Amino acid sequence: QVHLVESGGGLVQPGGSLRLSCAASGIIFSIYTVGWYRQAPGKHREFVHSISSGGGTKSADSVKGRFSISRDNAKNTVYLQMDSLKREDTAVYYCNAVYSTSRGEKYDYWGQGTQVTVSS
């Protein structure tokens, strides 16, 4: 059974930092692209940052220069370092792991989310 468990969310003041973790079990974690998405109240879920199995990263324009992503395959964990947080970063943050085979099969898993609230 596959599990993705996010942690590290919480309440932080504007300008502060948080580090989110996504711990995976039940999959060969190293072959998956892992991404972070977020969903604010009344809004659609949006892409934040991702890291491929080879370490390549992509990020949304809204977080460039403030958020960074890394992975530790030995710990089956991906981290999202969030600095210079803004009120508009407030959302539930979700971890996603995806892998597509050469035959077109897709394996796609989501965590349960962790709340990040940026407020003074």
Image: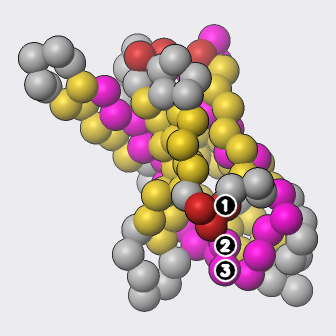
Q: Residue at x 40, y 36 (%)?
A: 97
Q: Which residue is mark 2?
A: 89
Which three-letter amino acid code belongs to the residue tagged 1? Val
Judged by depth in the image, the label closer to the viewer, 1 or 3, is 1
Q: What span is in magenta?
A: 74-99
Q: Residue at x 19, y 31 (%)?
A: 106
Does residue 97 sit above or below 39 in this rendering? above
Residue 69 locus on image (x, y percent): 66, 39
| Quadrant housing the N terminus | top left
The secondary element bearing badge 2 is classed as: helix
47 on left or right of 44? right
Does residue 27 sit above or below 18 in this rendering? above
36 on left or right of 77? left
Label 3: few (<14), some (14–19) or many (≥20) C-alpha neighbours in 10 Å: few
Which three-letter amino acid code belongs to the residue tagged 3? Glu
Asked if the stretch drawn in magenta spans residue 79, the answer is yes
Please tell me the numbered disc located at residue 3: none
Q: Observer-nearest residue: 25 or 101?
A: 101
Of marks 1 and 3, which one's residue comes earlier in the chain? 1
Asked if the stretch drawn in magenta spans residue 116, the answer is no
Q: Which residue is mark 3?
A: 88
Q: Observer-nearest residue: 89 or 102?
A: 102
Q: Which residue is mark 1?
A: 63
The answer to whether the residues at label 1 and label 2 have Cβ atoms under 8 Å apart is yes
The answer to whether the residues at label 2 and label 3 have Cβ atoms under 8 Å apart is yes
14 on left or right of 36? right
Q: Quadrant of residue 43?
A: bottom left
